[in-house]
Amino acid sequence: MTAILKVGDRTITAEEVIPLLAKYQLLPQLLREIIIDQAIATLDCTDEEKNAACEQFYTKNQLTSEEERQAWRSRQDLTLEQVEELAVRGLKLEKFKQATWGHKIESYFLKRKGRLDRVIYSLIRTKEAAIAQELYFRIQEGEQSFNELARDYSQGPEAQTGGLVGPVELSTPHPTLAQMLTVSQPGQLLPPTRLGDWFIVIRLEKFLPVQLDDAMRQRLLDEMFTTWLKEQLRQQISLGTPVQS
């Protein structure tokens, strides 16, 4: 058996590496990186792109001077070429994402938009149907404010904010609650509704439609990549089966 690593008084052999990775739940991460390497293997970068990627890498790690960079490489046991490869790998991955899913962002955005739009709403929840009905009427008739009643009667954390929740994406609340908010108009008070063990009274305060800006484009690109990567792992990992080259 070939020894490849010594930790304290323990010598680790090549035959032990895969079982150890599996034991410490690191094997999926290793296979994930192998899949990525295979995906970006044919991509290339210009010298200018490589230099910019290295500078961004050092800046991200707060290594501004050459002395700091040398000391960091020494601590990490990395050569200058290995650091460049590490930095450029991230650039190649972004290129892969753009080449594979960049043209699909608009249609994916339209598909996801209904769950990405944000809302601000007021909520009162109670276990008693009669109390929920009474609070609804008080708010509807203007006898007391939603804020005041939520602080006094709501039995969730929203009581601390006078019932106000958000802004949150519509994927965050319970699906039934999200659907109610989706079909509501700002300022509309909805009658008490049973939701699991609770009776809730809600009012949509503000609807904030999501915009397809640069940050959202990157988020959606990352989502599509993550979905693809999970599927690759599902297909290629079977009881520790290695990824085929």
Image: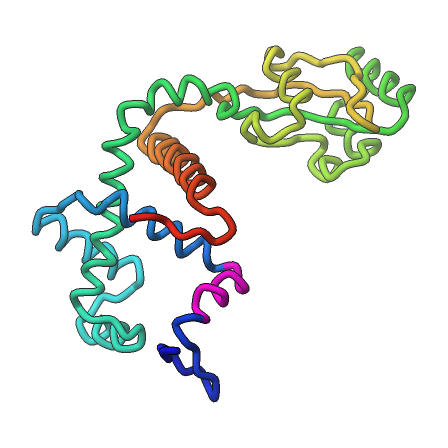
- The residue that appears at 21% across and 65% down in the rendered structure is 82
Region rendered in magenta:
16-25
Q: Main secondary structure of the magenta part?
A: helix
Q: Is residue 186 left or right of residue 110?
A: right
- The residue that appears at 82% across and 23% down in the rendered structure is 199
- The residue that appears at 83% across and 13% down in the rendered structure is 137
234 or 138: which is nearer to us? Answer: 234
Percent x, y of residue 170:
57, 25
Residue with the most extreme left position: 47
Percent x, y of residue 106:
33, 20
65 or 90: which is nearer to us? Answer: 90
Q: Is residue 77 magenta?
A: no
| Quarter where residue 99 is shown | top left
Location of residue 143 with respect to 123 vertically, above or below = above
Q: Is residue 92 left or right of residue 227?
A: left
Location of residue 241 with respect to 132 vertically, above or below = below
| Quarter where residue 134 is shown | top right
Location of residue 142 with respect to 8 vertically, above or below = above
- The residue that appears at 25% across and 33% down in the rendered structure is 98
Percent x, y of residue 91:
23, 47
Q: Is residue 245 left or right of residue 43?
A: right
Residue with the most extreme front position: 1
Percent x, y of residue 71:
25, 77
For the rendered model, the colour scheme is rainbow
The N terminus lies in quadrant: bottom left
How many numbered tags mark residues here? 0
